[in-house]
Amino acid sequence: MRVRLVVRTLSELCITVGAVIVLFVVYVLFWTGVKADNVMGEQIDQLQEQWSRGKVEQPKATGGAEASASPSAPAPYKKDKPFAIMYIPRLGFTWNKPVLEGTAVGTLKKGLGHYARTAQLGQEGNFSVAGHRRTYGDPFKDFPKLRRGDAVVLTDGATWFTYRIDKGPYKTVPTDVEVIDPVPRNSGYTRSGRYLTLTTCDPEWGHSDRLIVWAHLDSTQPVEAGKPEALRR
């Protein structure tokens, strides 16, 4: 009798533990994604509403070598607030994510995060952005698909900035902070310029390593001129 009671108790305990594990997996795989998608959508709506109310001086379009003549520096970004939207056609023509200031855990739950001490969008230096590979909307789930020549397009509501990937995905370790230097180490760049660095975790469900891509500013154009070529189907 006592043995049966112990076996039944252990069986019920195993079932309970199994149910908790299943619920946790559902939470991680599904619910955090649903919440993150909603939050990121709200961040984008907030930006678009802000841009529709404000009037920003539109710069002249630049392309190729002339892309170095970027617009004047924007005002400092506000911590944990969105300031741009990123599009990466390689990841799908419906892929778009807000970019917020900072890389704190709470910030990355709402979108991509700009490394606060790196260059501002379109400016000389290295505009560097981090994003989750998995959970919280899986923004960089398909990061390994990125290739040389791919476009990474951003807008701050006044200007479209088109960057072109030069190298990556490149694997390194989390302590390799030189990847976001103004002239990033191992990028192949040898002089100052207007660069973009994207970072995410590797492996897909871990964080022991980092994947990096580097890009240069290829062209800019005012929003009123329409979408850049990279976003036209």
Image: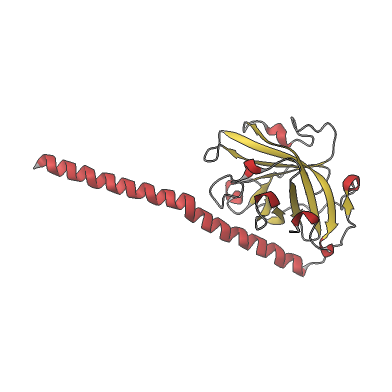
In front here: 184 or 101?
Answer: 184
At a point 79% along the width and 60% down the height, the residue shown is 227
Instruction: Give the vertical position of 84 relative to 174 (above or below).
Output: below
Residue 2: x and y, percent?
10, 41
| Position above or below: 115 against 186 | below
Q: Position of residue 43 (x, y in %)?
A: 64, 60
Residue at left 71%, top 45%? 116
Q: In this view, does 127 lie above or below 110?
A: above
Residue for point 83% across, 31% down: 190
Can residue 88 be seen here? The reply is no
Q: Is residue 20 visible?
A: yes
Residue 11: name its quadrant: top left
Instruction: Locate the C terminus by quadrant.
Output: bottom right
Quadrant (top left/top right/bottom left/bottom right) for the N terminus: top left
Residue 41 placed where, x, y %?
Answer: 62, 61
Task: Work out which residue is located at the far front of the displayed protein and give it.
Answer: 233
